Image (spheres, rainbow, N blue to C red):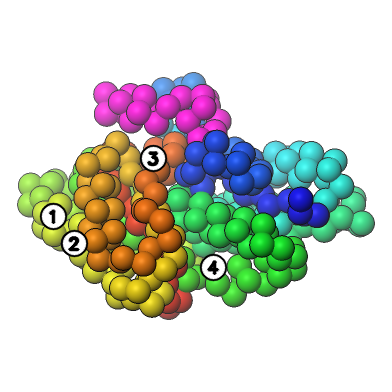
Amino acid sequence: MSDYILSCSSTVDLTKEQMEDRDIRYVCFHFTLDGKEYPDDMGASISTEELYQKMTAGAETKTSQVTVTEYTQHFEKLFEEEKDILHIEFSSGLSGSYNSARLAVEELVEKYPDRRIYLVDSFGASSGYGLILETLADLRDAGKSIEELYEWIEKNKLRMHHWFFSTDLSFYIKGGRISKTAGMVGTVLNICPLLNMDKEGRLKPQEKIRGKHKVIRRMVEMMEAHAEEGLDYQGKCYICHSVCMEDARAVADLIEEKFPSLQGKVKIYPIGATIGSHTGPGTVALFFWGDERKDS
């Protein structure tokens, strides 16, 4: 049993059972679906399948980050176990949640001078953020101290690669992330944009690729180019998707064929409500450890 607690927010896009099994604590983001508020609790309150069905049928979605008060309550509850906390937060490049967590930590450090909270901006999202937490849980279970984990993740967090593509641009148009004209042209031409995450934790468009099969191959080529040890990559690989399992499985099959030394099979997860509310259906994301992200 560790003498500290590993904590995060619910946007890691893993399963509730997995979080409990690895003893990773979390605090929930929120979203509204046609005016009704839900916690983003990894599908416990509403399944991802139902969420995307309602979105496709025209339901309005809106997300909200964790408040300073909610972080404070979360950390104080963990303090009841008389342990220190290492909290890894959702990317500050996508949300203000890191700043809210920072304000809560500053308040609690004064209130509980004998307790320690280490706070880290993951610069990560979705199951890439989840893979960071899984890796830290492995290191914790191997006997690493909270200081060792904090130093390790601060040194290595930019080695977590995030690559995304989407075959459905309608929700990008709806959310204003691409113009209506560009979205319509992209849809007609069957354009599947390929994006990654930059060193500041922001999504960055990389290429406009025509056709799903081509973008799948290109995504795997990015893993070949950037994965630790290239085709000899021996780490874990995660994929997540928004109700397009066939596409996610196609990426996973190609990766398992090209990377024979993977640590286990590729794990596939659903994209949760917070990120899925913005992408809509048709998005596939790939995550792996590799070289350090250099772009800005």
Residue 268 rendering spot, x and y as whole percentages: 37, 46
Residue 58 rendering spot, x and y as whole percentages: 29, 25
Residue 111 rendering spot, x and y as whole percentages: 90, 50
Mark 1: few/some/many CA within 10 Å (<14, 14-19, 20+): few
Q: Say whether disc 3 or disc 1 marks the residue closer to the N-terminus.
A: 1
Q: Which of 10 and 101 is in front in this view?
A: 10
Picture residue at 61% right of the left edge, 46% below the top? 22
Mark 3: few/some/many CA within 10 Å (<14, 14-19, 20+): many
Picture residue at 56% right of the left edge, 60% below the top? 135
Residue pointed to by mark 3: 270
Q: Say whether disc 3 or disc 2 marks the residue closer to the N-terminus.
A: 2
The disc placed on residue 217 is 2
The disc placed on residue 157 is 4
Label 1 close to label 2 by CB (< 8 Å): yes
Check disc 2 and give the amino acid type.
Answer: Arg
CA gap, disc 3 to disc 2?
21 Å
SS for dot 1: helix
> In the orientation shown, which residue stands out farthest toward the right?
114
**Left/right of residue 136 with respect to residue 273 in the rendered view:** right
Q: In this rendering, does residue 93 appear at all? A: no
Picture residue at 27% right of the left edge, 47% below the top? 248
Check disc 4 and give the amino acid type.
Answer: Lys
CA gap, disc 1 to disc 2?
6 Å
